[in-house]
Each structure stands twice: as C-alpha cells, then as structure tokens.
Amino acid sequence: MSRARLLQGNEACAEGALYAGCGFFAGYPITPSTEVAEHMAKKLPKRGGVFLQMEDEIAAMAAVIGGSLAGCKAFTATSGPGFSLKQENLGFAMLTEVPCVVVNVMRGGPSTGVPTGPGQSDIMQCRWGTHGDHPSICLTPAYVQEIFSETVRAFNLSEKYRTPVIVAFDEVVGHMREKIEIPEAGALSVVDRTKPICPPEEYLPYDDSQGDVPPMANFFEGYRYHVTGLNHGPDGFPVNASPRIHTDQLRLLRKVEANRDDIARNVEYRLDDADVAVFAYGICGRSAKAAVDLARAKGIRAGLLRPLTIWPFPEAQVAALSARARAIIVPELSLGQILFEVERCSKGRCRVEGIHRVDGDPIHPAQILARIQEAL
C-alpha cells in the first residue's frame, strides 16, 4: 500500500531519488535546495548508500559523475549560483554519456540575487548552460507529489538514455508542504541502465552499431574502458576524425530528439475550447490554473498548457494551440525567456504576451486573470 506523508517539496525530491534506487549523493549546501541534501544525509547511509558533502559545487558534480561510473544511481541538488558552477562538468557528463540527475531549486538572480525567493530565470541555462552542442532533458514539476514522481522519472530517463537529466522547480514549490502518496515498491516503474552482454575484452563503451544508447558497463566489474571529455571513438579514446565527431554529436542529440514521445509530458487543463491559453510551469503553473478557473467562472473560455518537460520544448503542442487560440499568456518569474520559445513555436498565428516578475514574490492568479481579460 502507498504511504501518505506530509512533505516539503525538497524532501519529496529526496524521497523520489531513494525510491528510484539512488545510491550516491554529492552536494554542497545552498539555499533554497539545502533540505534535499539534509534529507539524503539522514536517509541514504541507512540504505547502504553514500552521502558526501563536497568542498564546492564543481567537486560535487565531479563526484556524481564518478559515482555513476562506479555503478551507482547518482545525483546532486543545488540552486542558481551552484548550478552555474556545475556547467562544465555537466557538459562532460553529456559527452561521456554518464547518467546522473541534477536538481536545481531555482531562486532569483543574477549572482546571490534573492536566495529565499522563487525564480525561473535559470530555465535557459538548463538548456544552454554548458558549451557546445549537447542534448538536454529538463523536468519542471509544480506540485510536491509531482516532485516525487518526476524525480523518479528523471532517474529512469537518465539511465535509459545515458545522459544527465535536470529537475528544475522554484523555491516556493521546493519549500511548500503538501500531503503526498509514496507508492509501495514496484508500483512505479524503475529503470536501470542496460549492461553489456559481451566479454570484457570485447566491450566498446561507445559502440553506436548497437544503437543510439550503447550498453554501459560499471567500473570495478571487470570492464576497463577509457572516459575522456574529448570527442572519442567507440573505444572511448580521443579521435580527430571529423566524420566520426560529426556523426557522434548527431547521435547524442538524436537520443533525446528522436524519443520526444517517450520523454515529454504535459498537463492540459480546460484547453479544448479555450479562446485564451496560458503557458506556465512551476509556481506560475499553479497560479495559472487558479486564474483559468476564475476566468471560467466569469464566462471566459480560458485554458492552461503546463509542461512537465520543458526541455525538449513542447513545440508541436504550442504550435497546435496557437492555431486555435486568440492569445497565449506566458507568466514567468524572469524578465522573459520561455516567452520567446512560445513566440517561436507560434509563428505569428496568435498573440503571445508575457507577465514577468523578478522581485522575489510569485505571480498571483489575479495578475494572470487580468491579462486573460485584456487579451479578449
């Protein structure tokens, strides 16, 4: 049977990681994500796992990569400035195809910004933060129950596609307490990485002849292989052959882009006949849902598209919505980031208007309702 718990969002994130089989956490305390680390420090060693508080965020990300290569499901949690510090090693994990989960409890910025208030201005960094062409999967839960389930899903996607996965939610959702149900073991699917079946002497860690996601051997199990941040061949050693570099870069992107139907999830609320739609995630998604209900009570046909997967971006859904709605309202706790993605996908088929707030407080339903009314 499932267990009912009253949990903070950050605590639910840690519980989701444990449910998914996480065996290694490395991190560094930073507001407003610290409770994730605190919960893991308390629970993980009791389950035979390893918790490490590192000297900084760079080392934490490096340790997570090492923990994953050694065979553990590994993750870290941070907030804006720490997420910036993780970017180089995050890119290393993408190129070397090391599965891991990075949680970013977003706050205001830049720099120290508003440590105790919500923000969403990291969302483009979740897609483009590290240098070079690389895949990106980023999940954006808005409720404590979703934080639990989406953290489990983040581990599953990471293991399945051999790539880092980011879970991004804002301070309000991370510190909010709600009743959630933790399912019994086995109720939610838990995915483990595909292991090689060949003898160790025949193993090639990046052999794309076996598909876009090659089987992954763990260190210390008899499989010895090379891991480098340079472009590499099937054996893991550096290459300078441009055809191989090009095709391998395309494969890394294809792992995500060709599997959008498996990776992407969105919540649609009262959209079937909506004249005005709202596109929002995180705490803005919660405010938007309330605003839609207020609009409907006034006889206004409003609806909400709330992405649980912000990257890859729900391009087809936004395009279809823009073809039938008069306007799309985009509330976000930034000065305009996702607004431009919605405009790009709408291609001028309808008006797209943003609501922006960066003062450390969330956008209220009344603000969204007012903009819905103005859009008619």
Image (cartoon, rainbow, N blue to C red):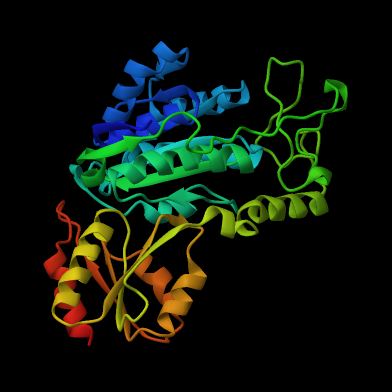
Q: Is residue 136 above or below residue 78?
A: below
Answer whether residue 21 is visible to the viewer in this image. yes
Left/right placement of residue 48 relative to residue 132 reads left
Front one among 362 and 243: 362
Front one among 89 and 137: 137
Q: Residue furthest front?
A: 1
Q: Quadrant of the C terminus?
A: bottom left
- Which residue is found at the position 73% from the left and 35% from the top? 215
Q: Position of residue 115 (x, y in %)?
A: 20, 40
Answer whether residue 333 is visible to the viewer in this image. no
Q: Is residue 239 above or below residue 138?
A: above
Q: Position of residue 169 (x, y in %)?
A: 32, 47
Q: Quadrant of the N terminus?
A: top left
How many callouts does the rendering have? 0
Q: Is residue 285 above or below residue 271?
A: above
Residue 25, image quadrant: top left
Q: Position of residue 65 (x, y in %)?
A: 55, 28
- Which residue is found at the position 18% from the left and 84% from the top? 374
Q: Position of residue 312 (x, y in %)?
A: 51, 58
Residue 106, image quadrant: top left
Left/right placement of residue 56 relative to residue 171 reads right
